Image: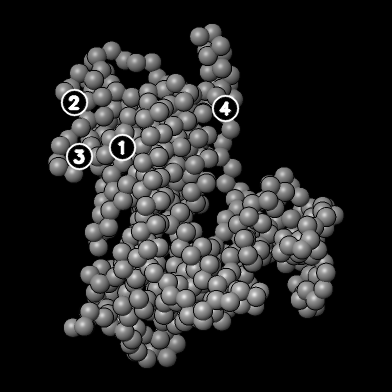
Amino acid sequence: MAAMAGRAAALRGSGVRFRWRTRVAAGGVRGAARDAAGRQDYDLLVIGGGSGGLACAKEAAQLGKKVAVVDYVEPSPRGTRWGLGGTCVNVGCIPKKLMHQAALLGDMIRDAPHYGWEVPQQVPHDWRKMAEAVQNHVKSLNWGHRVQLQDRKVKYFNIKASFVNEHTVCGVTKGGKETMLSAEHIVIATGGRPRYPTNIEGALEHGITSDDIFWLKESPGKTLVVGASYVALECAGFLTGLRLDTTVMIRSIPLRGFDQQMSSLVTEHMASHGTHFLRGCTPSRVKKLPDGQLQVTWKDLASGREDMGTFDTVLWAIGRVPETRSLNLEKAGVNTNPNSHKILVDAQEATSVPHIYAIGDAAEGRPELTPTAIMAGRLLAQRLCGQTSDLMDYDNVPTTVFTPLEYGCVGLSEEEAVARHGEEHVEMVCLREPPQLVLGLHFLGPNAGEVTQGFALGIKCGASYRQVVQTVGIHPTCAEEVAKLRIAKRSGLDPTVTGC
């Protein structure tokens, strides 16, 4: 007990302002909640059963706190449902990577004859069989999360939660039964959902999103993907790889926020391998024809001309919206950005209410990435339990776009580096002045995620260009080319590799 008190005092001295409150008498908020029928009392209540929320809950429980998780998935407009685990497990990273791998296997089969394998010219793909395997794997992960919560004695409620006041939420089951839960600290980790366009006739009635594509039992057939985000290009990439006629409609630029030279290389590779692109176009109407096909009308923004085409599936990938508007945040006094509806947080993930926190996609200004939400959740739990004062570092976070030719990056894009440091100071996305710190690394090639993960550590540790080129490459690999970089973009020289 003395050690705990000493640690708490040390943390208060270091500027960490939160700690577990002493329980109040029955006349206080928590006492009243405990006395009311059906209400339960927790040290920490996590709203949202995705990657970040589960990581936070399990960490706090492991450190001895009484923890509950509430999670509820509203069906998509198409009616798709899934289990515990959030976007990444159910309708994001995991099924996406599996379908991406299925498409890569198709490419390998096409290449196999060149390596002496006698393979039939046409090898059909069975969407139903692939989808069943992917969905079974996802369901096993859902069950695994349930078991982990049980093992750590985290109470799980499958209810839709909304705030009653700053310490209490009301959860409603699918059948309408209400449960009141109160906690000293509350973490909001509700994530986000795909955005549907609101000004396009037939978009909601006839379109699907990434919430649905991985749970389709039958092949989507000829598909129009609307959007230029990484979700759009990843889905279009694996659909093309599975031999489906796929078109991507882009209004402006692909992969906004990423390095634009690399973005162009990504789409050029996709186009050369069978993905069709409609650039500078926006859809205006989706109409279902008597034969079940979807007739899409769109406008070319440059010429103003209207055109149309027919597809079996229209997939909207035009961004995401945070799952915050049904939480009744105003009853708890939690402030949001009125435009994005994301929750405003400080460096400690705290909202405008000191004991309520937000992590992951629901928080303003945070990367919409699973690993950052997981790490932020764990660190938050550790701080709340007096184990550390470390804050989540959101700089130099690596990520990968799993297009057919994968694109991994960490640090600044060329555009960001030039804007921050000036063109005369930037070379090969590193500073020109000694020690030429590496500002960013961008890799386009096979297994880009594996390559980028390794170099991310070096950049996190402040690697310089000199240290990179002094690193001995592993031969023959794609990754060794990073250690062999000698040609600056501004030199105009051809960087094509012609030998070892």
Residue at mark 3 to residue at mark 2: CA–CA distance:
12 Å
Please name the residue that numbered disc 1 is placed on.
Answer: 70
**Foreground of the two, 235 or 179:** 235
Dot 3, crowdedness within 10 Å: few (<14), some or many (≥20)? Answer: some
Element assignment for label 4: loop
Residue 388: mark: 4
Q: CA distance from mark 1 to mark 3?
A: 10 Å
Residue bearing the label numbered 3: 172
Work out whether mark 3 precedes mark 2 in sequence or the reverse, and give the earlier one.
Answer: 2
Say if mark 4 contacts mark 3, CB within 8 Å. Answer: no
Residue with the most extreme top position: 2
The crowd level at tag 1 (other Cα within 10 Å; few <14, some 14-19, many 20+) is many
Measured Cα–Cα span from mark 4 to mark 2:
35 Å
Q: x and y percent of residue 476 in the render?
A: 77, 63
| Rendered location of residue 222, percent (x, y) | 36, 79
Point out residue 52 in the picture as x, y percentages from the top left corner.
45, 42
Left or right of 151? Residue 433 is right
Q: Position of residue 403 (x, y in %)?
A: 53, 67
Q: Looking at this view, is 126 or 93 the one in front?
A: 126
Residue 150 placement: quadrant: top left
In the picture, the disc for residue 202 is: none
Up the image or down, 306 lies above or below 353; here it is below
> The disc labelled 3 sits on which kind of residue?
Val
- At x 54%, y 67%, the residue is 104
What separation in Å lies between label 4 and label 1 (alpha carbons)?
26 Å
